[in-house]
Amino acid sequence: MAFKLTEDFKARAEKLCARYPRRDAALIPVLLELQKEAGYVAEEAMDELAKFLALPYARVKAVVTFYTMFNREPAGKYHLQVCRNISCHMAGAPGLLARLRAKLGIGEGETTKDGLFTLSAVECLGACGAAPVMQVNEDYFENLNGEKLDALLEDIKHGRLRAGGR
Ligand code: FES
């Protein structure tokens, strides 16, 4: 079945577009809105969005594939993105990833059976001074270690996730 942007989504997207001098400048906020609604940005959604914003499809696709915050397939409710670049690597990111793999029983790029978590290793999140860093949906968790990670997972499982928990 062909993908269709809902009228409700279009209304919200129009409001976002109105905040910018040019319609194409709203691409990232509109994509985030789409992902919030659908959980991911499907191929057909990129096509529809390109038409809606009067942009080339290739531009939308380039943005979605460049930024790791965009999921191209259905993802878990919580997308755990562990930075694997040099600062985080030196500060223990490989251990965090191994811990997450063991605790969740999934590998990178996979989602737990209950649909709660998707695990990814991503490039620099731009918070190297607070390495190691993990992004959970739109929030950053910095200076992580094994204990903090365990506590964070428990908070998420019990619906107690607090944004920016450092
Ligand atoms: S290296 Fe991890 S945030 Fe930059």
Image (spheres, rainbow, N blue to C red):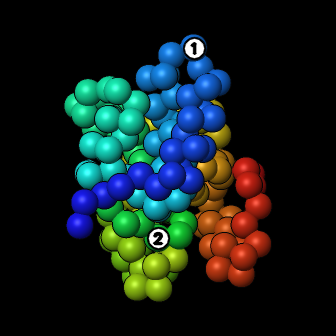
Query: Could you tell me which secondary element the residue under label 1 belongs to?
Result: loop
Q: What label sits on residue 21 in the rendered view?
A: 1
Residue type, numbered disc 1 = Pro
Q: Position of residue 82 (x, y in %)?
A: 48, 54
Q: Splitting the image into 4 quarters, where does residue 75 fall?
A: bottom left
On the image, the x and y values in percent for residue 56 come to 26, 27
- Residue at 48%, 34% in the rendered image: 28
- Residue 24: % across, % down: 44, 23
Tell me if I can see residue 24 in this picture: yes
Percent across and percent down for residue 119 are 42, 65
On screen, residue 128 versus residue 121, left or right, reads right
Badge 1: how crowded within 10 Å, few (<14), some, or many (20+)? few
State the quadrant of the N terminus.
Answer: bottom left
Report the side of 134 relative to 139 (left or right). left
Q: Which numbered disc, 2 or 1, marks the residue closer to the eye?
A: 1
Q: Is residue 101 left or right of residue 154?
A: left
Q: Residues within 10 Å of mark 2 (few under 14, many from 20)?
A: many
Residue at 56% in and 53% down:
8
Q: Is mark 2 within 8 Å of ligand 1?
A: no
Q: Earlier in the sequence, mark 2 or mark 1?
A: 1
- Ligand 1 within 8 Å of disc 1? The answer is no
Amino acid beneath label 2: Gly
| Towards the viewer: 152 or 85 | 152
Return the residue at label 2: 76
What separation in Å lies between label 2 and label 1 (alpha carbons)?
Answer: 35 Å
Q: Nearer the viewer, residue 53 or 69?
A: 53
